[in-house]
Amino acid sequence: DAEKRSKQESIRRRKSSILGSPEEKRRLSSTATDSTVSDAVLGEDGSLSSPLPLWPASSSNCWSEPEGSLFKVRGGNYFKDKVKVPSAPSAFACRGVDLWLTDNAMSNIGRHPSMLGGKLSSEYTFIVNFLMPWGNLVSYYRIPDEVEGSVGKVWERFLKGDQKYRDARLKLLPVVVEGPWICQRAIGPGNAPAVIGKALPVQYHSTDKYFEVDLVVMASSVARGILSIVKSHTKNIVIDLAFIIEGTEAEQLPENVLAAFRLHNLDPDKCPMLPEFVDAGEHEDEEKE
């Protein structure tokens, strides 16, 4: 009906403004849906669901959880032989992934009631939130009651550590599974994880419902440059992102992937807008002022 068409047109215009390129603007102004998401779950405005569809129910615009063994981590004798080995399965199982479009990326996004389709608070969750110039890429992981082995030791110390301690140990290992050469070159061969705190500002938020790590991509010119290249090719990329806490002592080895997810051929144009959110506490403070 007319109201629905008007809503779709308004959303298309907002996405066009956020995503920016002339090609994307022309495509967004001409159509709301296309065959690339025919097997995905769509809302009434033509956007993907929250969380994104799980592969293989959808062949594109979706996520899955890669095997831990695909990632090389420090082995049990790394400080003697410098040998890396395939990781054991990820310590935290992935609950889902969201890409929210917005021109004002949100920090501490776990407090937003729309996260993970509104089901975030049903389980204690580890959240990794990428703050980008045009949106929030958010992944969610189930934190078990007991984290066993060496990864449990580093996780416990990570939780108790201060900002400096955490920044020096949380690592990101991206691996391009499928994709054009330019993206593989920008991201690298996928065998050397980067300590995130050395490249980006990182924020941490802890509640009784979640522990969130915010990676402020938009604050780094290098990261923005890489993101710009990848963003132009996301529909042709399958990429893994693994998070590892660095083992700095023998008792913390072998390392283990803490959490990981895989994105399959994601078209940002099809992702939902971040719903408006007003923090009740902030609103009360404003009223007092």
Image (cartoon, rainbow, N blue to C red):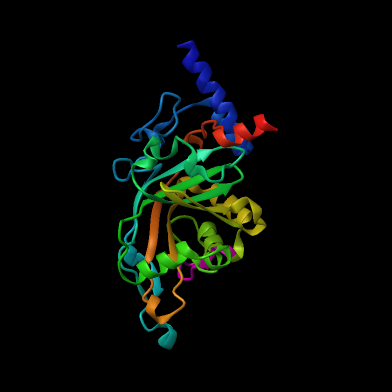
| 15 on left or right of 138 | right
Which of the two residues, 192 or 151, is positioned nearer the viewer here?
151
Q: Is residue 230 magenta?
A: no
| Looking at the image, residue 147 lies above or below residue 39 | below
| Looking at the image, residue 170 lies above or below residue 102 | below
**Quarter of the image where the C terminus is located:** top right
Residue 37 placed where, x, y %? 39, 35
Outermost residue on the bottom side: it is 80
Residue 120 placed where, x, y %? 39, 41
Outermost residue on the top side: it is 2
Q: Which residues, given as a range, are shown in magenta?
A: 189-197
Number of numbered discs on residues: 0
Image quadrant in which you'd find residue 215: bottom right
Residue at image point 53% right, 50% down: 130
Outermost residue on the front side: it is 288
Residue 25 placed where, x, y %? 60, 32
Image quadrant in which you'd find residue 266: top left
Say if residue 266 shows up in the picture: yes
Residue 226 placed where, x, y %? 59, 56
Residue at image point 67% right, 31% down: 288
Residue at image point 60% right, 36% down: 282
Which of the two residues, 126 or 17, is positioned nearer the viewer here?
126
**Quarter of the image where the N terminus is located:** top left
Say if residue 279 shows up in the picture: no
